[in-house]
Image: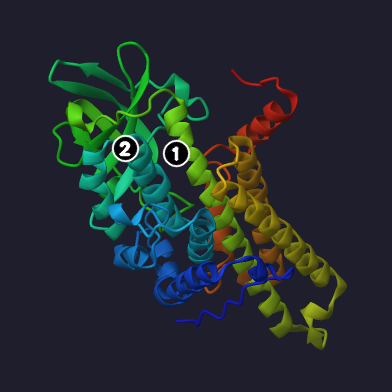
Amino acid sequence: MSQDLFQAPDYYHLDDLLSEEHLLVRDAAREWVKRAVSPIIEEAAQHAKFPTSIISGLAEIGAFGPYIPEEYGGAGLDQISYGLIMQEIERGDSGVRSTASVQSSLVMYPIWKYGDEAQKQKYLPKLASGELLGCFGLTEPNHGSNPGGMETKIKDMGDHYVLNGAKMWISNAPFADIAVVWAKNEAGRIKGLIVERGMEGFTTPETHNKWSLRASATGELIFDNVKIPKENILPNKDGLGAPLGCLDSARYGIAWGAIGAAMDCYDTALRYSKERIQFDKPIAGTQLQQKKLAEMITEITKAQLLTWRLGVLKNEGRATTAQISMAKRNNVDMALKIAREARQVLGAMGITGEYSIMRHMMNLESVVTYEGTHDIHLLITGFDITGIPAFK
């Protein structure tokens, strides 16, 4: 078992912009990843199995709803702390970060923001502790980038609702205890509701044969005349803006997380280039390898500055959807390019499980698509700067 020797790059001394609390939170997550994730993640990815043993650790480092108020079991941290935790977890693996992101931004966030007090008290403390795990049902077989076209329906039966439809590409679905699901009522209005495992007609078949996010459990949500109690409807927001608000929080976390994956690939390539001898000297002493490494650290530094500023805006309540889209799109694209370049630095060794780079590269092929595709985020920015939508 190889030792985790990761050293985080901080070329512009960005740690100076972080508070003592930020550094404590970040360092605790970093040490936990080194201790609990790095030693087991390659085997988990090779066997396409989510490592359930890490759930309690994720809860202990505050990865589940870190910005949720303490009265509901959260850590009451700010948005930069949330981002730093996601950065460190994705440095370990994007699939593990997906589990934490979904739990935080797509399950706990809507219950906290859109739920009533009884729902908050019932679910949030158990979600924060990892006693309950959740998933988020928006994407459908026929509706990905166009969630407003969803076909999943709820029908008012007087004292309850009946839910029918299907969702797919759902992280955490195979083992989730609850699902925050979005469906249209008879008037065509999108409503959020909490579906609990064990409700008759609710099944979660797992998606197999993935080449990406192999250490993350992905599945479908199938609803066949599922009876939903009226107290399980999220009462405080509806319409497409409700799930999109959750996605803003999740995309923000991804923008930070992608930096973690990029840092790991860069650090691995830098260390390898200093140790690999060719033509009687380390390959780090060749111009082409230095070009790769210099460009990597430049792009990582730019992404760090972009995301730190976004975190400040989030804390001030001023971050816009378009700003979050820009950071998600830029940082994931950056990380994917760095993973590919880092793999070339390692040559053939870069494709083996002895190093993390190929796993990161495969994972990032999913990250660049989910939570809004690379192209859709480009169009969100285009709409924001021109005022003219290029999509319906």
Seen as rendered, the residue at the extreme right is 287
Tell me which numbered mark, 1 or 2, is placed earlier along the sequence.
2
Which residue is at a point 42% across and 77% down the rendered structure image? 35
Can residue 98 be seen in the rendering of this structure? yes
Residue 11 image position (x, y, % from top left) = 73, 70
Q: Can you tell which of label 1 and label 2 is closer to the viewer?
A: 1
Separation (CA) of disc 1 from disc 2: 11 Å
Q: Secondary structure at mark 1?
A: helix
Measured as percent of width and height from the top left, residue 242 is found at 42, 30
Image vertical order of residue 231 relative to residue 354, above or below: above
Identity of the residue drawn at 52% across and 79% down? 4
Q: How is the image coloured?
A: rainbow
The circle on residue 180 is: 2
Q: How many marks?
A: 2
Q: Residues within 10 Å of mark 1 (few under 14, many from 20)?
A: many
**In the rendered image, which residue does mark 1 sit on?**
246
Identified by mark 1, the residue type is: Cys
